[in-house]
Image (cartoon, rainbow, N blue to C red):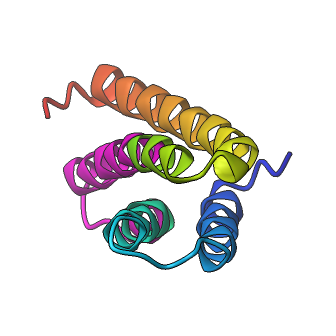
Amino acid sequence: MNYNLESRTSRFGEIVIDFCKSIKPGLISDPIVRQLVRSSTSVGANYMEANQASSRRDFSNKIRICQKEANETKHWLKMVSVINDDYKNTCLYLYKEAHELTLIFAAISRSLNKKFNIKN
């Protein structure tokens, strides 16, 4: 597993994009796929923004957004798995990664809040 969080979050978005390319377009799948791509790629984008934060509070807020976007991605993966049974295994794999990212960002957020007494 890759422990460089910037690379890991970028790679996560790339894998989700590649997966979404395989999903058959349709009235139901199109909006779900758009949301999935937006939330999954937002994790890495917000993490990169966090690394350029102007303050501890800004960093903490961006980390919290990363956590929320990773968590939202789990929801959209569940919805994709409903579209077609063939997607279930890939969705489960991606769900596990999104869940791990959610836990990582939650731990970072808790640590920052405790260390710097930051209230979100």
- The residue at the point 26 percent across, 67 percent down is 54
Looking at the rendering, in which quadrant would you find the C terminus?
top left
- The residue at the point 36 percent across, 51 percent down is 69
Total marks in image: 0
Q: Tell me where residue 84 appears, x and y as whole percent.
A: 59, 52
Q: Is residue 57 left or right of residue 86?
A: left
Of residues 9 and 119, which is closer to you in this image? 9
Q: Is residue 38 left or right of residue 108?
A: left
- Residue reaching furthest right? 1
Compared to residue 20, the image places residue 77 above or below, namely above
Q: Toward which corner of the image does residue 88 lie, by quadrant?
A: top right
Of residues 115 and 47, which is closer to you in this image? 47
Q: Is residue 70 left or right of residue 10?
A: left
- Residue reaching furthest top? 114
**Residue 80 is one of the magenta-drawn residues:** no
Q: Tell me where residue 50 appears, x and y as whole percent.
A: 38, 61
Of residues 57 and 69, which is closer to you in this image? 69
Q: Is residue 75 left or right of residue 82?
A: left
The span picked out in magenta is: 45-74
Q: Main secondary structure of the magenta part?
A: helix
- The residue at the point 65 percent across, 35 percent down is 96
Looking at the rendering, in which quadrant would you find the N terminus?
top right
Q: Tell me where residue 2 appears, x and y as whole percent.
A: 82, 51
- The residue at the point 23 percent across, 56 percent down is 58
Q: Tell me where residue 45 appears, x and y as whole percent.
A: 44, 71
**Residue 63 is one of the magenta-drawn residues:** yes
Compared to residue 6, the image places residue 119 above or below, namely above
Q: Toward which corner of the image does residue 111 lie, by quadrant?
A: top left
